[in-house]
Image (cartoon, helix red, strand yellow):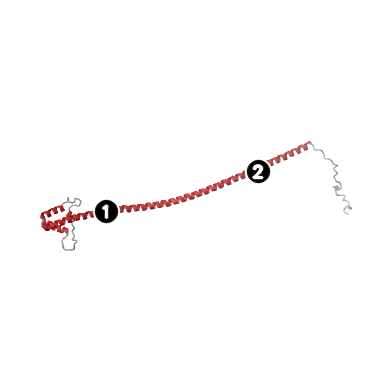
Amino acid sequence: MAEGRRRNTSEPFIEDAHRFPDTGEKKRRPSSPADQDARRRRAQQRKRRNSVFQYIAILFMAAFVLLLFTFMMERRQSRQQIDDLKQSASAVQTLQGLMNENSVLQAKVAELEQELTKQKAAADEFEVNLRDVTDTLAHTENVLEWTTQAMDYFWQINDAYVRGRTALCRNLISQIESPDTTPEAGPLMEYLPKENSTGTDRFSPYDRYMEIRNKVIK
């Protein structure tokens, strides 16, 4: 079949390896010094490359560790800053609360001061009114006392006139009209009632006094 076919004479002759195996009889030629030097340089170059790669790897690892350490430190610092900001925000809120409370207290103080001013003005007015009332009451008491004294003189004058004791009547009249009898009040005759409080047609004490005076003193 295929083996029985004839080889084409135009094809080149190629020995098959399985047909002609290498018997190992061929010996390698000894390498020259140039080849050995080249191999030695290549080995040194490979060692240098390996050393460079190892150095680069070490540098890379160191840089990675440094970056990781820097990241951790920045993260810690950021947390610290966040905590500080939170504390600052809390302090600001507390301060704002205190300021608001202070504003409220100031408003209350101002309101109390206004109320105190009003109360003081009312107290001053009350004190003035009380002083006026006290003075009026004291004057009323004095007038009542002087009126009582004047009426006492009036009854004595009226009794002396009725009894016909003219000298005594004149003496009593001079006393009731003298400002020295009661220096604080002046003449007591001015305090005799000028109105009739009995409801009759009789004269008032002042009118009766003037009637007696006109008849006794001429």
Which residue is located at x 65 percent, y 43 percent? 61
* The residue positioned farthest toward the top in the image shown: 33
Q: Nearer the viewer, residue 201 or 166?
A: 166
Task: Say what amino acid the circle numbered 1 marks.
Answer: Thr
Q: Residue 24 location in percent, x, y?
A: 85, 43
Q: Position of residue 134 (x, y in %)?
A: 26, 53
Question: Which residue is under mark 1?
Answer: 134
User: Would residue 69 appear left or right of 26 to someone viewing this image?
Assistant: left
Q: Is residue 16 above or below residue 211?
A: above
Could you tell me residue 77's position as x and y percent? 56, 45
Side of 40 where 182 appears, left or right: left
Quadrant position of the C terminus in the picture = bottom left
Neighbourhood count class around disc 1 (C-alpha, 10 Å): few under 14, some 14–19, many 20 upward: few
Where residue 89 sits in the image (x, y, percent)? 51, 49
Is residue 39 shown left or right of residue 117? right
Are there few (<14), some (14-19), or many (20+) residues within 10 Å of tag 2? few
Inter-mark Cα distance, 1 to 2: 105 Å
Where residue 147 is drawn, which disc sits there?
Answer: none
Q: Earlier in the sequence, mark 1 or mark 2?
A: 2
Q: Are marks 1 and 2 in contact (CB under 8 Å)?
A: no
| Residue visible at 29% across and 53% down in the picture | 130
Residue nearest the viewer, comparing 179 with 70: 179
Q: Quadrant of the N terminus?
A: bottom right
In the depicted structure, whether residue 161 falls above or below residue 24: below
Circle 1 sits in a helix, a strand or a loop, which is it? Answer: helix
Q: In the image as oriented, which residue stretches furthest toward the bottom?
A: 200
Tag 2: residue type? Met
Image-quadrant location for residue 209: bottom left
Q: Which mark is residue 61?
A: 2
For the residues carrying marks 1 and 2, which lies nearer the camera in this image? 1
Secondary structure, mark 2, is helix
